[in-house]
Amino acid sequence: MGCYLHKIVVRGNKPLFGEVEIQGAKNSALKIMAASILTSEPVVIDNVPKIRDVNVMVDVLEGLGLTVSRNDRRIVIQAKGPIGIEAPYQLVSQMRASIVVLGPLLARLGRARVAMPGGCNIGLRKIDLHIRGLEMLGAKINVGQASLEAEADVLVGANIPLDFPSVGATENIMMAACLARGTTVLDNAAREPEIVDLADCLNKMGAKISGAGTSTLVIEGVDKLKGASFRIIPDRIEASTFMVAGAITGGDVTVKSVDPSHLKMIIKKLKSVGCDVTVGINQVNVKGPAVLEAANISTLPYPGFPTDMQAPFMALLSLANGKSIITENVFENRFSFITELRKLGGEVDIERHHAVITGGSLLKSGAVRAPDLRAGAALVLAGLAIEGVVEILDIHHIDRGYDSFPERLASLGADIKVTKDESLVELSLAEGDSYQVPDVGVGI
């Protein structure tokens, strides 16, 4: 591991220009890694991002007894031999996505003990939908204060309606149902591209899943799954973040190696604030306007506007001409970012789950803390647009989901510095310069 990042320093008011390759989707990689528990054969996963959450999931799987080997962006996982049933608190508390080992462990071993999930402080993210769905498959689950234990002599297919299209619950139930007896029908299922990716991987492993990408999943249980090789999709949230970076700086940024069909809502909203957006084959170009226009946004499950992009767009709309309203319908604590944005001069009022943003005023220099992964990235974006210096602390949150974020912004022309424990590393690029990317703790 590299040195621990503790501060990003941005000198803004500098348009970004150039191209950036988008890495594999965090939320596909983590869930497909968990799916490797379902078979004793090797699962080979390509295009895995080099981020902290992947590191944590590796630790979770190795702690359960799986073997994991890594070569750049390829990970090979095998659950051969004795496997433990417990995902401990010290690992699960670092990342909420760890809860998705529950379904695979239950299906493969008939028992599981998983600590209550941690991760970003963005809301309750109750796991009652996970529990209810697994209970309908025949599991007995005991929820304690710090962990939950699940047992099942046999899982049996069932008709399971979800009260809300929860991504995590859809994934947990789908993985468990792959090895259940009979057919499971999951209604009001999540429709995110990462759900489709997981279903595609499971089907390559021998599962029988249909309807992925729609609100109804049908899973026909099979006796066993086999190994497979799978390449995960590009990260639509990372792509969206770099698109906003181009917009907020009035720059010209092209995101490459993307699936534009996953970015339709982001493209629509960037156009509404005045950006010129051009969609090509596996790439999207964003040219920021001289003056950003106000817009209204409501977060919704896919294919609606992603809650993960609420904070980056709030930073963008703080510079727009006029009043904008963002309505958060997914996570109740996502507005905790507003406190930090106000330190930079953002004018935002909260009315229940609505944020009213008065844009057009110049933001100012300051020091802020990243309260969570996406808010941390949004504060960096705000820094890119501010005429002055912004320092962002607690950036370990950013490392959880963005692969080499400061370096890649620097490659687009950002004036950005990363503070290590022992020294300050300059990443700003002048025209014609080259640089050696330092070890700043975001790699594997």
Image: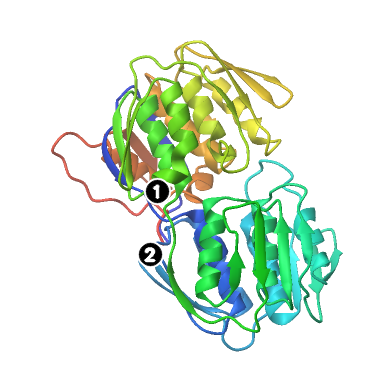
Q: Say which residue appears at 57% left-offset and 62% top-offset.
A: 31
Residue 346 image offset from top left, x and y in percent: 54, 18
Residue for badge 2? 73
Determine crowd level at label 2: few under 14, some 14-19, many 20+ residues with C-alpha closer than 10 A.
some
Occupied quadrant, residue 154 = bottom right
Q: Say which residue appears at 63% left-offset and 76% top-offset.
A: 64
The kind of residue on which mark 1 rests is Asp
Residue 204 image offset from top left, x and y in percent: 50, 73
The kind of residue on which mark 2 rests is Arg
Q: Quadrant of the C terminus?
A: bottom left
Name of the residue lying farthest toward the bottom: 81
Here the colouring is rainbow
Determine crowd level at label 1: few under 14, some 14-19, many 20+ residues with C-alpha closer than 10 A.
some
Occupied quadrant, residue 348 = top right
From what the image shows, is residue 219 above or below residue 348?
Answer: below
Upstream in the sequence, badge 1 or badge 2? 2
Residue 259 numbered tag: 1
Residue 46 image offset from top left, x and y in percent: 40, 66
**Left or right for 330, reference 402:** right
Q: Say which residue appears at 47% left-offset and 24% top-offset.
A: 316
Q: Secondary structure at mark 2?
A: loop
In front here: 320 or 214? 214
In front here: 17 or 262? 262
From what the image shows, is residue 191 above or below residue 325?
Answer: below
